[in-house]
Image (cartoon, helix red, strand yellow):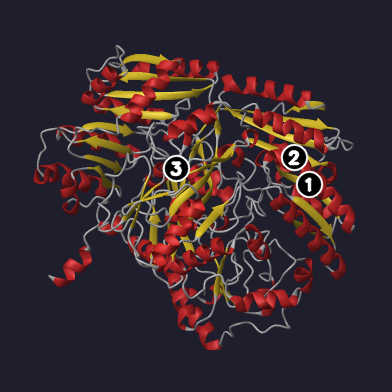
Amino acid sequence: MTESLDEFTPTTQAELARFVTNNAAGEKRSLLSAGGRTSLNFGYQASGEGGVTINMLELTQVVDYPARDMTVTVEAGIRMNDLAELLTGEGQQLPIDVAQSQRATLGGVLATNTSGPRRFGYGTLRDYVIGISAVDASGRLFKAGGRVVKNVAGYDLCKMLVGSMGTLAIVTQVTLKLKPIPESSAFIWAQFNDFDDIDVVLERLTLSDTRPVSLEVFDRRAAGQLATESRRELPSDGPILLVGFDGGQDEVAWQVETLRHELSPFGSAKVDSVDGEAAGELRQVMTEFAICADAPLTFRANILPSQTIEFLEDAERAGVTLQAHAGNGIVVGHLPDDVSSIDRAKEIIDPLRQLARSYCGNLIILDCPADWKSDIAVFGDPEPSWGLMSRLKETLDPDGLLNPGRFFDGAKPVTVQESTS
Amino acid sequence: MSSAATTPASSISTDLISRFRAIVGDEGVLSEAEELAVYECDGYVVEKQVPDVVLLPENRDQVVAIVKLCNEYKVPFVPRGAGTSLAGGCLPVGGGVMITMTRMRRILEVNIRDRYAVVEPGLVNVHLTRHLAGSGYHYAPDPSSQGACTIGGNVATNSGGPHTLKYGVTVNHLLGLEVVMPDGSVVELGGPCDDNPGYDLTGLFVGSEGTFGICTKATLRLTRDPAAYRTLLGIFETVADATQAITRIISAGIVPAALELMDQGIVEAVEAAFQFGFPLDAGAVLLIEVDGLEVAVDGEAEQIVELCEQSQAREVRRANSGAERQLLWKCRKQAFGAIGRLSPSYCTQDGVVPRTKLPEILEFITESGARHGIRIVNVFHAGDGNIHPILLFDERDQEQVARVLKSSDEILTKCLELGGSVTGEHGIGVEKINFMDKLFEPNDLAVMADVRMAFNPDGRCSPGKMLPTAGACGMEHIERSHPGRKAAL
C-alpha cells in the first residue's frame, strides 16, 4: 500500500475497504478511481477538489482460473493485454475490443463499458461479467453474482456496475465467462462509391447466409487512415464496409466466398479480403480508431442500425471522420482538426444530436477539451429515467464521494434553470 | 399448507374492491374463494397463500391506477404471469392484491432490420417464437415451460432454457423496459437503441423477481436463425460417463447450442409418455445440439461423437429428420409433465455448479435421495452446470414433505460448497430465501437491500421475496406455517 496526500494505491481489496471506511467516517474526501487512465477524459471532470485518486494498478491478482470451466476471476487493476495473454495460453478469450489495451485495465473497461467491432457477434462486457466485488462509498466490500456461468441468486449488481463510471462503487474483482479463440478470422473489405450503396447492402445482409461477427462502415477519410495504418493496399477511394467472420477454417472460408457472391449484384464495389494474422491486426487498427488524440472532439451516437447511413451522410457533410458499428447503430465520429472553438463544435454536434434524438437515440461526447464540457451536455439531454438513477446514486453514495459529477450527475440541472427563469 | 391460520397483512375492503372494479371492470376482478384458489401457488406447490383479490388489467394505465390505489390503501401487491415459477416467485406473501398480466399479451412491433420486437409482458414466450417463424429471426431464450410462461415472467426471473448455453439468458436479449414503479409512476428504461447513457437499469431490473416494479412493455433483441442443426443423442451406461463427455466437449472449445442430460429415472417417464425409443437400461442420455452454418455443423457433430465415444458412450444416435429433432426436444421440454407418471407431486431444485463438478454433485444427489428415502430423477442443462434434481413425493404426507425439504437443502448446500449457486434460472422466490445468507455476506445483502430501497422504498411491491430481510411480516408467517423449512436449516 502506498499513500500520499492525493493518491492511495491499495494492494488488496481489504486495504481499499479500510481506507474507504475511514474516509467515510472521517474527512469524506472525494474518491476518484483510476486504472490505466486511458478514458479519464470520458465524462465530466469529477469535482474532485481535495479528492484522493484511488490508483487501482496494484490490484492485479489472478484469483482463480479454472480453464476447463471457462471462467476466470481476476482483480480489476489487471491490464487488458495481461489478461489476454493469460487466456490465450488456454486457447480462450474475452471477446471485447479495447483500444490501448497495453494500458487499459479491466476495471476501467468495465466502468466505461467499452466495446468495439466484435460487439455485433459477441455482445458487450455486460454479457461476460458473471460475478463482481466492489467497495461502496461507505467502505462496504460487497459482491454479487458468483463464479458459475448461470446464476440468478440476488440482484444483478454486475449489470448495475458495468458502465457506471465508478460512481456507485469501486470495482475490485471480476469473474468473467470466457469464449474459445476461434480457429480462424477474416474480413471482407468492400469499397463503395457512396453511402447509399452501402445502405442497400446492409439491408440485404439482414438475411445473409453468412453470420458476421462485425459489420463496420467507415467514411472515405477513415478508410484511408485505416488502409495506411494497417499498411496494406486496400481500396479507399470511397466509404467502405468491413464484414468480419470468426470460426473454423472451412466455416470462415465459406463465408468469405458466400459474402463475395452476395455482394456481387451491388455493382460498383471493389472487394478485397484479409485473413490470418492480418485480420487480427486490422481489427486492432479498427479498435484503435475510437481514440484520436488529434481530434478536438470525439462523439458516439447510438441510433437504430437502419438509420446509421443517413446519420453518416449528414455527419460526413459536416467534415466528421466516421466509424460505425453498423450492425448495432453505433457511430463514432472525430471532428476535424480545424474546429478550435466550442461554438464551432456545437454547430456540428447540435444538429447531429437532434438527428439522433429524432430517431429515439442519443449522442454522447467521448472526448473534448475539459473547458467545453459544461456547455456541451456530455451525456446528452436529461432523460426521465435519470431521476431513478439519481435515487440509486443517492442511496448507495449519499455523500456523493465516488467520482462526484463525473457521470450524468455532472450535467447542468436543466429543470432547475427553467424554474428559476 | 393451509393459510387459514394466518391473517393476511392487509384486509381488502369491499370499498377497495369496488374501486378496483371501476378500473378493470367486473371481468377483471376475481374475488370469490373458488376463483382465488387457482392463484394460491405457482409451480412451487410446497407453500400456498391465497391472494385477497386477483386483478387482470388490460393496459398500462390500468396497472398504474391499480398500483396507485394499492398505495393509497397501503396494501401489498404482486405481479404474476402464467405462474410457472418453480420457486414461489408468484406467491402473494401476506396476501394482498395479485396483478395478473396475462391479458396484456400483444406483440406491438417487430422490426427485423433493426433486430428487435416490442411486446407486452403477458405474451406467452412460444407465441413470439411462432409469430417470428419464417422471418429468419427468433427470440433466443426458450425456457422448457415456454408453451405457458410469459415474457414478463421471463424478465422477472431472468429465465434461461436449454439453448442458453450458446445464446445466453433473458438479460442478454433485453434492450429496454417500460416499468410501472412501486409508487405508480411510469419509467422507460433502455430502448431499441444500444448503449443508452446512464446506469444499466434494464439489466438491473431483469431477475429482480417483481420487487422493483411491474414491467408493462419489453423491447427484445432478436437473433438470426441458425442455418443448420445437428441433434445427437449420446447413450451412456452411467451418469459419470455422461458428465465426463460434457467436460470433454466444453474443454475442446465446442460450444453446443444445447447440452442436456436425462438420467434413467426421467428417461423411463419420458419414454412412457412419448415412445421415442429411448433405451430404458442406459444410466444417462445426453441430448446434444450444435447449430450454425451447414459447412460447420457436421464437423462439430463428428468431433462430439468422437468425444462421447472416448467417454465410453454405448451409442450416439443422430436425429435424421426435422420431425425426429422436434420429438427429441418435445421429450426434453415436456419431461416435467411426464413426471406425473412417477409421482403425485414433485419439487425441482435449480442448483448450479462449475461444469467440472457435475460428477461430484450428481453422486451427492444420489446419496442424499437414498439417505432420506426420496426418489430423485435428473433432467438438466448440463452444459451450464445447472442441475435440476426432481424430488418425487406425495404432498399429502407431511413427513415426506419434510424429508424432501431436508434433501433439497442438503443438495443446494453442497452446490454452494462446490463453488456454485442455489438457483440458475428459477429464482430465489420464497423457496430459497433462507439460502441468501449462506450465499451472500451481510454486506452483499445490505447493498442489495439498499438497491431495492431506490426502487421500492415502501416494500409494498412483491414483499417477502428475494432478500431475507424483505417485508419481514410476510416471512414470519411463512416460517411459522412451515416448521419443516426451519427445521431443515
* Disc 3 from disc 2: Cα separation: 43 Å
Total number of numbered discs in the rendering: 3
Q: Nearer the viewer, mark 3 or mark 2?
A: 3
Q: Residue at x 35, y 30 (%)?
A: A287
| B257 in relation to B487, above or below | above
Classify mark 2: helix, strand or loop. Answer: strand
Quadrant the N terminus of chain B occupies: bottom right
- Cα distance, mark 1 to mark 3? 45 Å
Amino acid type of the residue that numbered disc 1 sits on in the rendered structure:
Asn
Screen quadrant of the C terminus of chain B: bottom right
The quadrant holding residue B346 is bottom right
Instruction: Where is residue A187? Give x, y as percent.
Output: 40, 20
Do the residues marked 1 and 3 share a common chain?
no
Q: Do the residues indicated by labels 2 and 1 lie within the same chain of the protein? A: yes
| Dot 1: chain letter | B
In the picture of the structure, the residue carrying the numbered disc 3 is A58
Q: Is residue B257 above or below residue B373?
A: above
Mark 1 residue crowding within 10 angstroms, few (<14) / some (14–19) / many (20+): many
Indicate the position of residue B122 as horizontal and vertical percent values: 54, 59
Q: Which image quarter: residue A281? A: top left
Placement of A399 over or under A89, stated as above or below: below
Identify the residue under disc 2.
B261
In the image, B141 versus B418, the foreground residue is B418
Mark 2 or 1, nearer chain start: 2
Q: Secondary structure at mark 3?
A: loop
The residue singled out by tag 1 in the image is B378
Q: Pointers 2 and 1 in contact (CB under 8 A)?
A: yes
Above or below for B69 versus B343: below
Q: Amino acid at mark 2?
A: Leu
Q: Secondary structure at mark 1?
A: strand
The residue closer to the viewer here, A74 or A183, is A74
